[in-house]
Structure formats: C-alpha cells, structure tokens
Amino acid sequence: MFEMTTMLPSCALALFATACASSEPIPPRARPSNAAEPAATVVLASEVEWEQLNPARGDQSPKAASLWGDRNGPGPTGFLVQFVDGFSSPPHIHNVSYRGVVIDGLIHNDDPNAEAMWMPTGSFWTQPMGAAHITAARGTVTLAYIEIEEGPYLVRPVEEAFEVEERPVNVHTSNIVWVSASEITGSAPLDAPTPADGPKIAFLWGNPQDEGPSGIFVKLPAGSAGVMRSHGSIFRAVVIQGSPAHHAMGGLDPTIMGPGSYIGSNGASARLSCESGQDCIFYLRMEDRINVIPAVAAEGK
C-alpha cells in the first residue's frame, strides 16, 4: 500500500470520510458503520424508504428516498429518485438548482425542445433553478442521485420560469475524463500501482482551492481496495456502479453496498473493496483534501 495526499475540489478524492453533522438526523434505517466511529453511517439502497414525488400521477409518479439531509427543509440534501420505464414529465421548473448522477437506466434532462440525449450510468447533469425543462426515463429500473444546496426542493409550473446566470450541463459518461490518482500529486512510491491498476478520479464541480463543497467521481478497479482519510468536515459518498464492500473496524463482516447506497462519516477513515466483476464508481461530496491508500484486495495478492 502507499499513501498519497491530494488537493482536490473541496469534495476531493474521498471514498471514505466525513458525513452527516452530528446535529443532522440519521436517515431512516441508517446504521453506524462500527462502534469505534459512531459518526460513520451506511444507508443501503435496499433499505431506503420511498415516497411519491407527485402522488397525483399515481403509479406513474417518480419516487424519492432521502440519503442525507431533508429535501423538504432548508439546507443541502441528497436523495435518490426512481422513475418508471417511459416516464416523461411535462415542461416545468424547480425553485432550486440541482445536480444529478445516473445510477441505472437512461435519463434525458433538457430544454423541452431539445433533441433527446439519453444518459446512461455514470453520466452527470445539472439543472439551474427557474429554467424550463423536461425529464424522461427509459429502462426497467431507472435510478438517479439528486443533490441540492438549499431546500426545499419543489416543482413549479413552466409559467413561473425565470432567468439566472447558471447554465445547464449534460455530461454523457463517455465524456467523463478520468485521471490517475497518482498523477494528481505528481509522484508516488516505487511500489505504487500503475495508473491502470490504481484508483482514478474525475472532477465534476466546485473549486479544489476554496473552502466550499465540491464533487468528484472516484473509481476503484475491480479486484482492488482502498482506504481514504478525510481532512475535512464533510464527506458523503454514493455508490454509482458496482457492489463494493464497506469494511468496518473491529473485524465485523463487511457490508455489501449496491448502487444507490450511501456512506458518510465526520472526518473518519473508511475501507472499501471492489470485489465485483466490474469497476466500482462513487460520487463524492466533501471539503478539503483526503489521503488515498490503495491496496490490492484480491485474495492471494
């Protein structure tokens, strides 16, 4: 293993680190990752509590499930949204801007007159407040992670549209630019994994040099593991692809986290392994820098 300190966007290379503030209520059925680090929280996608975003649409309504924060209250929050196959919203606006990451299925989010651009797993988009748009979905299971900076998250009719300086962003997964973690520091020990074998990151939003939050993707190659230590006070990670295992301290059995699962802690370290047949990708939101300690997880290596 080797240790590598990175200066990433406020939400730097953090697979495991800070999470919910102690004053924030733990989401339904959230579980401490271990007794030694009571601030660490794991929320499995299989255990979240869903509710309809628009009950008037009945079974066609998108469903939402909170991972952290309260989308109906003030402050930032992150939640899952699930769509039925073939869903297409009427033109509408939101009272707040939001970011989205496609976890499963295909999602189109754009101006009502725009040609459809279907974004698959690992795609990233932003939707400015006040801008008219539609959202559509394809796939038996279509799932996305949504994040806002200030609630409540509301839907308004397109007649109430208003202009802001912010512009929408749609980044198809094929346009995500991955950088080897070792390249960020410019140096690494001789026994460090090669860029092909080690963790990679992709910068999404925010400024790595300021004190505000920012977001990145982190990729752990299949058959690898890593420990990440946060130097900041906010760390939140959502599984986008793969089925990583969270290894708690104290010899407890690892917790398998499917896509849409969440882990957070207050400045603590965490260890994840990617033992599934595909690379594991995480969306990370945090502040300050983190240390990344990659390690080969496959048995016998």
Image: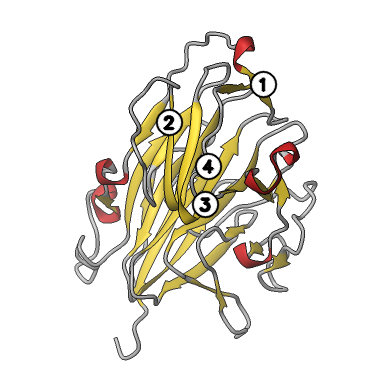
Where residue 118 sits, quadrant-wise, is top left
Q: Which mark is residue 87?
A: 4
**Residue at (36, 63) in percent of width and height:** 3
SS category of the residue bearing label 1: strand
Residue kind at label 1, given as amino acid type: Arg
Residue placed most toward the observer, 209 or 64: 64
Quickly name the residue at label 3: 143
**Residue at (32, 40) in percent of width and height:** 172
Can residue 11 be seen here?
no
SS category of the residue bearing label 4: loop
Residue kind at label 3, given as amino acid type: Leu
Is 32 rendered above or below residue 210? below
Quickly name the residue at label 2: 207
N-terminal label among 2 and 1? 1
Q: Find out whether the residues at labels 3 and 4 contact each other: C-beta distance under 8 Å.
A: no
Quickly name the residue at label 1: 156
N-terminal label among 2 and 4? 4
